[in-house]
């Protein structure tokens, strides 16, 4: 395996990890505030559809992005309404959102575009194009540094850079601001936050909405940056892999980034090398596809470190009994 | 209460008359969905053509899960639909279980040829022959000497496609390098354009400049990426040349639409048995239209048409993957 191949695999890793990372950070905000969210998949899917649809109709990818975020926020609001205001079961609400998104996207798409549950192909300004960093052409010839700079770092769409900048931003918000402290406290001990005179409901809604925005960007990335349009079920389980990454990262932002990059790398390797021959032992591609889930189960089972979810996670807060 | 009774009575009456009225044909789409721009959509187009021409109507269902296969078959058979047309190899097991229970209903199985039942019309396509032709075109159009193949779910049928393609490419250029990848091993592999894109990018970085997608909805991503990166792609099942005019070299046509149209036209008097649709029967072929005319030179056309004739005459034999579960031209 030569150096260029490694760069190409890593480049693919970055592209594949980006939607995972955005969804994973979305889940991080929500779950740190005590709201489990298995509806990441549904929110991404809904956003993917609306971003592609609006971008196709208006020809502006930015309006598409806004529409995608708005659609995702609507579902996030629904999840908040069900699980915060009405104290419903958060898992059931999440499942319902996934089903809702899977059905509604195809239904609306068919009614709107009559192209069989997909949007028209996006062209020109309807897509996020790659951003070439300055000097990437000139530096490409430089050994080692050149390819890393021009292939790996430069030439992604702006949403990729937003996703990776969201990691330090998330860390700063959660661990260096008053809002973050309260948000984490609400996930651990909402009664204490309530005693301090801070609104538990307000904080949880804020977390769920941030989750909606991040899922919206993730969906728009799939439909308008990686692809040129929406295809039914195009998230293909990425929301669940993101959840696995969240658990793998033990609900911490930097770890979430590494977990998503690891899972992205596994996918990239699986795509590039199908069956890997390691000195006579052939590792079939299915092993790579299953590894994220296997790793998560191993972590959950407590073999390697222990994944402890936020203590108040999954439980609606009741002020008085 | 009386109102309820009346309503229920009326509903029952409607249900009974609907069942007895007229034997409508029924069409069961496979998991890829009715509008996959490919295999299932071809079936839908055939059915629509029949409906437009005859003014008839047909029943249809898009399967959402494996568990629905037998259920859908039984419901259509119970409702009196005739013939019941099924799409895809995965219907073989449910069909063999259900067909015997409804001896008066005719079933049509597309992509199934190995069942033993008197009331099933089984239609197999010689995908390897059609793929052979597009493989030749790919190798002739390729400048780098490397061609790619992206399959959907890793099943023998898709390997069958890939195997014919590889043989065609090797026939033109014995030194051609063939990069073959499968998207996955679950039905989700039919609807993952993002993975299709990544596979295409990976193949491009390995030198491929023509990529053949036999992958249902995943192929949309393959064709898109190929067009974005400035290489050629080959569509499958339906004519996909129009998706990216001038960027899609050709499409391997599998005339599922003709098979479905014929079955619906024959109606209850359908002939049962095993039918093979190869090049000779025009069951498979390659697409040539205004969108790809500039890409196919006269020499390419002549070479492919000669091979087509040789296959029909029996002078040229394309090895089927099914014969011994392996391919002489490529390893998957």
Image (cartoon, rainbow, N blue to C red):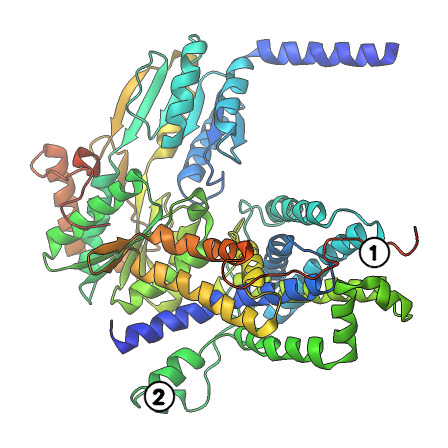
Q: Image quarter for residue B120?
A: top left
User: Residue B266, can we see it?
Assistant: no
User: Residue A210, can we see it?
Assistant: yes
Judged from the image, the secondary structure of the residue bearing numbered disc 1 is: loop
Question: Which of the pair A309/B161 is nearer the observer?
Answer: A309
- Which residue occupies 59% across, 69% down? A61
Q: Image quarter for residue A283?
A: bottom left
Judged from the image, the secondary structure of the residue bearing numbered disc 2 is: helix
Labels 1 and 2 touching (C-beta < 8 A): no
Q: Name the residue under label 2.
A: A145
Q: How far apart are marks 1 and 2 (CA)?
A: 53 Å
Q: Viewer-nearest of labels 1 and 2?
A: 1
Q: Where is residue A183 in the image (x, y as percent from the top left)?
A: 76, 69
- Which residue occupies 49% across, 80% down? A131
Q: Do badges 1 and 2 share one subunit? A: yes
Question: Which of the pair A151/A296 is nearer the observer?
Answer: A296
Could you tell whether B43 is left or right of A84 in the image? left
What number of labels is visible?
Answer: 2
Could you tell whether B248 is left or right of B103 in the image? left
Q: Name the residue under label 1.
A: A317
Could you tell whether B114 is left or right of A175 in the image? left
Name the subunit of mark 1: A
Question: Which of the pair B193/A149 is nearer the observer?
Answer: A149
* Residue B193 vertical placement versus B25 (above, below): below
- Which residue occupies 43% across, 24% down? B85
Name the subunit of mark 2: A
Disc 2 packing (10 Å; few <14; some 14–19; many ≥20): few
């Amino acid at each position: 395996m030569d150096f260029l191949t490694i760069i190409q695999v890593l480049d693919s890793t970055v592209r594949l990890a980006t939607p995972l990372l955005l969804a994973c950070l979305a889940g991080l905000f929500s779950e740190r505030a005590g709201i489990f969210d298995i509806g990441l998949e549904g929110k991404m899917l809904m956003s993917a559809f609306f971003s592609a649809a609006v971008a196709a109709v208006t020809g502006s990818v930015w309006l598409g992005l806004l529409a995608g975020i708005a659609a995702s926020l609507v579902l996030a609001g629904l999840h908040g309404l069900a699980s915060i205001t009405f104290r419903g079961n958060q898992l059931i609400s999440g499942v319902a959102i996934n089903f809702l998104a899977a059905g509604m996207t195809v239904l609306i798409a068919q009614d709107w575009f009559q192209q069989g549950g997909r949007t028209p192909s996006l062209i020109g300004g309807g897509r996020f194009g790659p951003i070439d960093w300055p000097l990437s052409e000139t530096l490409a010839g430089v050994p080692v540094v050149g390819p890393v700079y021009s292939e790996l770092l430069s030439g992604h769409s702006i949403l990729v850079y937003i996703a990776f900048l969201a990691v330090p931003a998330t860390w700063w918000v959660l661990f260096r601001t008053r809002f973050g402290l309260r948000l984490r406290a609400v996930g651990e001990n909402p009664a204490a936050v309530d005693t301090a005179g801070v609104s538990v409901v307000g904080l949880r809604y804020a977390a769920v909405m941030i989750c909606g925005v991040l899922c919206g960007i993730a969906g728009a990335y799939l439909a308008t940056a990686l692809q040129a349009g929406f295809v039914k079920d195009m998230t293909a389980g990425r929301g669940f892999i993101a959840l696995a990454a969240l658990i793998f990262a033990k609900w911490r932002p930097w770890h979430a980034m590494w977990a998503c990059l690891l899972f992205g790398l596994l996918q990239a390797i699986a795509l590039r090398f199908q069956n890997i021959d390691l000195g006579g032992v052939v590792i079939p591609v299915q092993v790579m596809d299953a590894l994220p889930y296997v790793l998560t189960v191993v972590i959950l089972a407590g073999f390697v470190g222990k994944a402890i979810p936020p203590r108040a996670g999954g439980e609606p807060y009741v002020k008085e009994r | 209460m009386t109102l309820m009774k009346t309503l229920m009575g009326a509903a029952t009456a409607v249900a009974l008359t609907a069942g007895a009225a007229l034997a409508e044909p029924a069409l069961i789409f496979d998991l890829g969905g009715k509008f996959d721009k490919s295999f299932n959509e071809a079936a839908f187009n055939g059915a629509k053509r029949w409906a437009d021409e005859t003014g008839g109507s047909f029943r249809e269902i898009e399967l959402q899960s494996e568990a629905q296969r037998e259920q859908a078959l039984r419901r259509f058979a119970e409702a009196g639909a005739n013939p019941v047309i099924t799409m895809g190899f995965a219907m073989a097991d449910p069909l063999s279980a259900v067909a015997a229970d409804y001896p008066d209903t005719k079933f049509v199985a597309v992509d199934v040829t190995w069942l033993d039942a008197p009331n099933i019309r089984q239609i197999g396509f010689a995908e390897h022959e059609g793929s052979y032709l597009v493989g030749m075109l790919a190798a002739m159009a390729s400048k780098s000497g490397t061609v790619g193949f992206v399959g959907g779910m890793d099943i023998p049928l898709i390997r069958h496609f890939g195997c014919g393609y590889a043989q065609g490419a090797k026939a033109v250029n014995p030194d051609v390098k063939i990069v073959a990848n499968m998207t996955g091993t679950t039905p989700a592999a039919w609807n993952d354009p993002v993975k299709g894109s990544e596979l295409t990018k990976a193949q491009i970085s390995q030198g491929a400049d023509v990529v053949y997608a036999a992958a249902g909805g995943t192929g949309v991503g393959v064709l898109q990426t190929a067009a974005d990166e400035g290489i050629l792609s080959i569509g499958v099942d339906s004519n996909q040349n129009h998706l990216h005019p001038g960027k899609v070299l050709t499409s391997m046509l599998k005339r599922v639409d003709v098979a479905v149209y014929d079955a619906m036209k024959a109606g209850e008097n359908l002939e049962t048995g095993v039918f093979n649709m190869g090049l000779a029967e025009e069951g498979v072929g390659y697409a040539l239209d205004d969108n790809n005319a500039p890409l196919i030179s006269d020499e390419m056309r002549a070479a492919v048409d000669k091979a087509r004739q040789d296959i029909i005459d029996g002078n040229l034999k394309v090895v089927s993957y099914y014969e011994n579960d392996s391919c002489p031209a490529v390893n998957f």
